[in-house]
Amino acid sequence: GGVVVENASSDELGETLSSFNQSGSGSGGSSSGGSLLGLVGTFLGLGIIPFTIFTASKAGDYGFQDDWFRPVMWLGLAGGIVFAIAYQRRRIRRLGKDKAGRGWFYFGLVFSAAAIGAMGSVACTSLAYIYWQPAPIAHLQERLMGSEEKDESDNIIAIRFDARPRERHSGQSLPSDWGQLVAEEVRTVRKIELLGSGVTNEVVSDLHTLPELEELYILSDEIDDQVMPYIAKIKSLKTLTIVGNITDQGFKSFEQMQQLTYLDVGKTVGTNRGMQYLSKLTNLESLVVPEGVTAGGLVHLQQLQLKSFILPAVAKTDLGLEYYVAACEPQAQIDLTSWEGIQGPGLIHLRNWMPIRQVTLKVTDKALPYIEKLVGIEQLLMSESKVSDAAVEHLAGLYLHLKSLDVSETNITQQGLARLKLALPGCAITGGSLRSRIDRATYQSRYPALEFDGLESYLSVGSFKYDGSHPLTAEAWVWPELEENSGNIMGNTRQGGFSLSLTSERYAKCGFHAHRASLTLVSENSVPVRRWCHVAFVFDGDKVTLFVNGVQQSQRSVPGGHRSSRKKFMIGADPSYTNSPTGMFPGAIREVRLSRTARYDQSFTPAERFQSDAETIALYHMDAMQGDRVEDATGNGYTAWINGASWLAGQPSDGNKSPMAEGDASSQTIVGPRQKTESDNPDK
């Protein structure tokens, strides 16, 4: 009975399938079962297509090679055909040829099985690979462990891996086969940057297989000389920057890199010996040499024709400049401000670049005889050089070609600057922040004085204030040292106050603030240069009058009375809004007196040395030397604090030196207010 039931079931199934496949219809339960089976088969047949594509794509992301898919697909196809044949033969044995289906059914079965076998094989193999691949990484960027740069065609052209502290890949290390992965995945890469301790010699070993790699930057304390043969194999390499433990032994590999145009080995441990291996890099345009290389090591590089050559500080000497000039193409300009080892002889070699347009340097007077020989130079920038007025004699010889000269913040004085302008009439000369120094050969005075350099020297009397409640006479004996001698003699004219000064043409000027106006009085004629001159103004409560050498020059009424200033009172300068000195005076001042009366109302003969009386507010003889201060001779306590001014000894007519003098026209510079007794200085 069991056999009969089994046969009946098989026959019924065969009839149902046969009926469904051949006529497309059935009856009763058999028809419903066949339709359901057909729907399921159709769903599976259509669903396997996107599933196969998805799994194959994922496997590709995990590193599965595209070439492997073809044999897997053929294997699945063959397996499907074998399965279809075996399945059909089984059906024939059970149902017979008539019920098992005819030719079209057989063909459809084989085709379907082959297609499903091929796709199923690819899908299953992909799933197996994904499962088998250890620590799978989904994206190429993550597999390369670096940031990427792509071109317009979406090709990766640059990779950057940075494992330094606080960087993107901090603490990570590249696998030893990283170079092989790059060679297999991104053969279009042109630039690679590998930074941090996670970079080892082996990482670079396969980079020579990249056909377009032109630029390589490696920074790692894990690399040494063993990495150099790997780099030497990269024949497409043009630019190389390497920071690591590369010694002279590793430098030998550079002999095989003659295609390089840029090389930076500044942070390696190479020495003079290693420079001999760079001499064959005839295509090199830019070179940065190791910090351990001295000027002597540059001798090997003289045959190069570099456009850019960066040297360490120890090589920046006169000898180094000789080799530098020999190794470089002629340049239109050169900046030697960082060459602190230059004494002068090396400058001679700049003549090989003539005509050179611009030279920038910081030197001393020792270099001047060599600069003098650079005939043909157009621009010479010597700002902050330690050169003195001796430069005038040497620079005068450059007058034929020199068009621009900068001697700002040098030791050249204002007097030297004036001589330079005469010696170089066709040259634009910049001489900002230059000191004035009185010519001792022409200076003369019976009494001591203070020399002001026009740059930093002044006296501060912060305790003195004038509120305009009484008349005022302000007067001083001054020695203008320069032809163009603008500067303040005394005053505090910010937001009120008064001042005495000289214009650039040496006209005496008085500035006086009234409540309703700001007044300016100017002398009729300029005061003589390098002569003692008495300058004064008198305010009598209604008007202010300017005098020069006792002769009245100008007078104006003061509407509404005087408007006072809260700023410091200064001698040799005028305070800014922040009480910093401005408009410093170049020359000497020997006598200053402030009086609470209108001492002069007509022309007079000024006293050579002022005297103190009941109307005197403050009096400074400039010979009451007390270290860093000038005491008020009236005893009123208006001490003047010295900042950078120099004492000048007097030369009395009787031939005896003044008590402070140690020699004719000698000087002693007073740097500034005392540091130990700041409480004594109201300006601190």
Image (cartoon, helix red, strand yellow):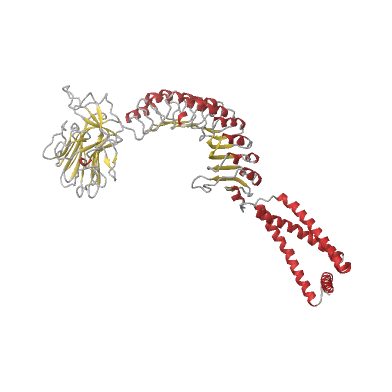
- Quadrant housing the N terminus: bottom right
Q: Where does residue 649 sit, x and y in percent of width and height?
A: 21, 27
User: In the depicted view, which residue is nearer to us: 5 or 648?
Assistant: 5
Q: Where does residue 29 sit, x and y in percent of width and height?
A: 78, 76
Q: Is residue 204 visible?
A: yes
Residue furthest to the front: 1
Q: Where does residue 148 sit, x and y in percent of width and height?
A: 58, 48
Residue furthest to the top: 655
Q: Is residue 59 above or below residue 210?
A: below
Residue at point 68% right, 53% down? 129
Quarter where residue 195 is shown = top right
- For residue 80, side relative to residue 457 (left or right): right
- For residue 201, side relative to residue 8 (left or right): left
Residue furthest to the bottom: 28
- Quadrant housing the C terminus: top left
Q: Where does residue 63 sit, x and y in percent of width and height?
A: 66, 50
Q: Is residue 649 above or below residue 561?
A: above
